[in-house]
């Protein structure tokens, strides 16, 4: 037991006890990689990611045929609909012979869906089913990325339709072009020449894997309601692609060796295996999204806890800096700040900035524009808002009505002490406004003109 405690303590010190700014680049990358592994394992252990993966399995089963039907309709218009069956078959390869059977059944369902027969109500329900699936995916990704707000309804509808219309077209078109390329007579002639033949075969073997990574990258960039860097999405997609391919081989071996389950469950065995395979696929997708999040925001890895907790002092400074940046740009006619830009300027993860920004916005001090992404401006003149009001708003931002400071027991000396603290802060700030704070480091107009 003592040895286990020592190992745990040393591991903790190695991962979290060092200032990464003072170590070599190689060691820093190693520690960050190990922290990422730990963080992903911790998130899985807490159960929220696995719970969302299971929820997506249920929604996928309801939405799979409508989703493929819509995609099939779009692809048919561009003449690449014949790629749907090979793609679905490739996804279900680990299920063995049953995978081909399921593919044929799904394609049969798709062919039986006739939009003209469905009518307006049926078509609406079809689209609603697909939108629900995409909404569930967005919510799962938002949880991974610590994003608290979903897209507005109009933006959600337009972006979801873009994903439905453009995504399958790009992927299946690429598959069709690739198949035509490798089937051309020129390429076949090159295959007969060594070592070009070996090289072409290697590329042909790697291309499906690269398509999977490209698809994952596209999903990671488009689905979360936050700006995801392509590089971080690519890192998460590469890991997810490797896991997906490796797990596919392992699951195929499991299916081949599990004849006893088929004997026990008979026809239900394929249903159970299909649901397990769907669950593992969604779990891999969410693991890749989690890795992309930690790659983009290494500040989330400074603590073994999932949530990056901000002290009151840090929240107050972030609030004052946000008010300064927004006010300064507004009064100097500079471009307004977005959430991502503020997070980058502060060097703090977006989700931490969003917590403070939301508190200031709810107090009516700032407002967001209709731009995409939204930008922030003063909701009313910063001359009418004091620094003291901003700090008071932040102090009470997360209070519950059922447990506010006013309903706690009253002790005369405690109340006098709190009142004196409040008066001291007010006196030291001398009614200073947010405009004064924002413009303190901006030179007067005459100075700017003289400098020019």
Image (tube, helix red, strand yellow):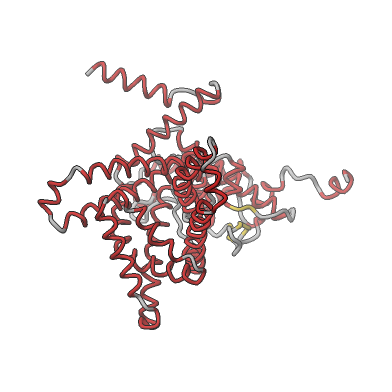
Res 242 quadrant in image? top left
Res 72 quadrant in image? bottom left
- Residue 393 visible from this viewpoint: no
Please say if 374 is above or below 7: below
Image quarter in which the N terminus is found:
top left
* Residue drawn at x 37%, y 33% as measured from the top left: 38
* Residue drawn at x 46%, y 64% as measured from the top left: 164
Q: Is residue 327 left or right of residue 241?
A: right
Q: Which of the pair 379/129 is nearer the observer?
A: 129
* Residue drawn at x 43%, y 64% as measured from the top left: 82
Residue 250's x, y, as percent?
29, 40
Residue 240's x, y, as percent?
41, 43
Res 17 quadrant in image? top left
Task: Report the number of numbered marks.
Answer: 0
Residue 46's x, y, as percent?
30, 42
- Residue 38 visible from this viewpoint: yes
């Amino acid at each position: 037991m003592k040895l286990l405690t020592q190992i745990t303590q040393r591991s903790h010190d190695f991962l979290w006890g060092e200032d990464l700014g003072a170590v070599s680049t190689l060691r820093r990358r190693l520690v960050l990689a190990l922290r990422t592994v730990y963080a992903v394992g911790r998130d899985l252990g807490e159960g929220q990611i696995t719970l969302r993966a299971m929820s997506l399995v249920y929604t996928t089963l309801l939405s799979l045929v409508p989703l493929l039907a819509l995609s099939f309709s779009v692809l048919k218009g561009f003449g690449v609909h014949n790629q749907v069956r090979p793609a679905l078959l490739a996804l279900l390869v680990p299920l063995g012979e049953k995978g081909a059977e399921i593919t044929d059944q799904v394609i049969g369902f798709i062919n039986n869906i006739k939009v003209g027969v469905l009518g307006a109500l049926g078509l609406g329900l079809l689209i609603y089913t697909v939108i629900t699936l995409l909404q569930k995916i967005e919510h799962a990704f938002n949880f991974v990325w610590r994003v608290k707000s979903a897209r507005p309804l109009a933006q959600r509808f337009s972006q979801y339709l873009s994903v439905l219309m453009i995504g399958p077209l790009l992927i299946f078109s690429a598959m069709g072009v690739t198949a035509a390329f490798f089937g051309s007579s020129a390429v076949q002639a090159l295959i007969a020449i060594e070592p070009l033949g070996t090289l072409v075969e290697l590329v042909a073997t790697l291309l499906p894997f690269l398509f999977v990574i490209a698809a994952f990258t596209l999903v990671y960039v488009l689905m979360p309601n936050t700006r995801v860097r392509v590089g971080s999405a690519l890192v998460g997609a590469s890991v997810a692609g490797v896991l997906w391919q490796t797990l596919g081989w392992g699951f195929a071996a499991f299916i081949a060796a599990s004849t006893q389950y088929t004997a026990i469950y008979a026809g239900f065995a394929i249903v159970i295996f299909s649901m397990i395979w769907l669950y593992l696929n969604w779990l891999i997708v969410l693991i890749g999204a989690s890795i992309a999040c930690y790659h983009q925001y290494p500040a989330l890895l400074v603590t073994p806890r999932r949530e990056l907790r901000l002290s009151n002092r840090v929240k107050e400074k972030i609030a004052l800096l946000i008010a300064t940046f927004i006010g300064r740009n507004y009064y100097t006619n500079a471009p307004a700040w977005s959430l991502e830009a503020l997070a980058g300027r502060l060097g703090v993860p977006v989700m931490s900035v969003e917590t403070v920004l939301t508190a200031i916005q709810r107090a009516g001090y700032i407002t967001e524009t209709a731009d995409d992404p939204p930008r922030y401006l003063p909701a009313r003149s910063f001359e009418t808002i004091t620094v003291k009001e901003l700090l008071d708003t932040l102090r009470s931002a997360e209070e519950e009505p059922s447990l506010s400071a006013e309903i706690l027991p009253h002790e005369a000396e405690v109340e006098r002490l709190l009142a004196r603290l409040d008066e001291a802060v007010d006196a030291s700030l001398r009614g200073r406004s947010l405009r004064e704070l924002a413009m303190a480091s901006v030179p007067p107009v005459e100075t700017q003109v003289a400098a020019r």
